[in-house]
Amino acid sequence: MAKAKTQFVCQNCGTVHTRWAGKCDGCGEWNTIVEDDPMGGIGGGPGKTPKKGRAVALTTLSGETEEAPRVQTGISELDRVTGGGFVRGSAVLVGGDPGIGKSTLLMQAAAALSRRGHRIIYVSGEEAVAQVRLRAQRLGAANTDVLLAAETNVEDILATLAEGKRPDLVIIDSIQTLWSDTADSAPGTVTQVRTGVQAMIRFAKQTGAAMVLVGHVTKEGQIAGPRVVEHMVDAVLYFEGDRGHHYRILRTVKNRFGPTDEIGVFEMSDKGLREVSNPSELFLGERNAKAPGAAVFAGMEGTRPVLVEVQALVAPTSLGTPRRAVVGWDSARLSMILAVLEAHCGVKLGQHDVYLNVAGGYRITEPAADVAVAAALVSSLANVPLPSERVYFGEVSLSGAVRPVSQTAQRLKEAEKLGFSSAMLPASSAEIPKGGKKGSSEIEGLPDLVVEIAGSARKLGKGQEED
């Protein structure tokens, strides 16, 4: 019989190596590679003869399907992200920076479900029972019937969950603290995390209980442990936010039972997390409409339209190489917009420092913000404010053309609801509602945008001379 090959796994990123090395080739960390049993946690093992398999029934794609039963929390922002509530028998992985509010959100969700008559079990592996009780008192959840345990052994947790009535929701905080007797390694290692997650998912599928697993986040912003964990679970949620701001965003990265790229917005307070039903008002709350270099971008997060202010500052530089600083947007995309402005619009920015910021600590990921960023840059360079009642969106190509973006109708509807009467959008935009183009400017290329802002600058200059 062939001898089982030994493999070495990085405990930081999960990269598999054929031999030990001091530095991991995947993440660059030192002294994180340890020897691992390739059959650990998978079953079988060297020396065991595999048993004969059984034939399974085959079926067709057509036929009646039932909608997955869900457990609704009553927290509308959380239910929106999960696609309508936690699906029974599913496993959800929640990641986020330390202290961002993961435990606070899950405690509030557990209390809300308990008030609705569901059986909730909260297993804490990082905090003692007294610490969890103190948080529950602060959040007003101490008077609920949430069952609490402080345990890290996988076998003991499964034995506890199997006793009594089946739980509707189980919260494990966190998976990095779990350890099993079947894996011969320290808690938090790749083998232990993989083994613990497999055991919890197996329990959820067999009993129909919804399982929520909390995961730590590495310095790169990824959930710690092997990436196979994200493939094993049914949904992956990231809880993110800037410590300098009081809002938090729960973002869907993967969801087998609902839409992805959906977000839920919360506001952190001393009483816990508060839902923000209209995030556009939050991001535009302290907007100065008369300041140059500020453009309102009408964006989309999943099915939700979000209006956010894009701020730019263009200033002459005395350095040989001008600075390019970006907060909340892709720096490579900013370089592309600057190159298009200079090559096709005649806007010279080679001797200027450029600073770009998305107000409120929000982060934009869609390319539809290209027109808003270009408008803010040209406005700051010309020192002329943009119309306060206008929103901007559209994707810019390398030729300078402005390409249409999806969900134009939802963007315009949200802008109209918040008092914006006009929009600058691509000329070839489809699905525009009736009356949606009233007061709006359609542009085919970025030079049209520059010409319009330059015309406003000349009118402003003439008005100041007459005064």
Image: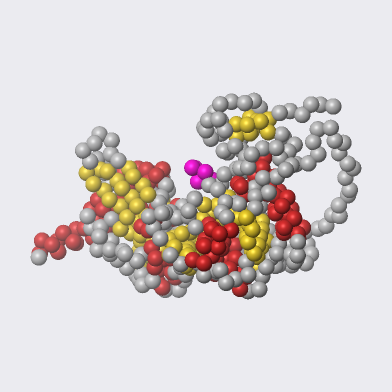
Say whether residue 383 is left or right of residue 287.
left
Q: Is residue 13 visible?
A: yes
The picture quadrant where one finds residue 287 is: bottom left
State how the image is colored: secondary structure
Residue 178 part of the magenta-drawn span: no
Say whether residue 336 is left or right of residue 23.
left
Residue 461, given in percent of the width and then of the height, sits at 16, 59
Picture layout, residue 71 above or below residue 16 = below
- The residue at the point 26 percent across, 53 percent down is 380
Quadrant that contains the C terminus? bottom left
How many discs mark residues in the rendered view? 0
- The residue at the point 84 percent across, 32 percent down is 47
Q: Is residue 258 visible?
A: no
Give the extent of the magenta segment.
Answer: 218-222
Residue 261, given in percent of the width and then of the height, sits at 54, 57
Quadrant that contains the N terminus? top right
Front residue (pair 454, 35): 35
Residue 255, given in percent of the width and then of the height, sits at 62, 57
Front residue (pair 240, 436): 240
Say whether residue 386 is left or right of residue 19.
left
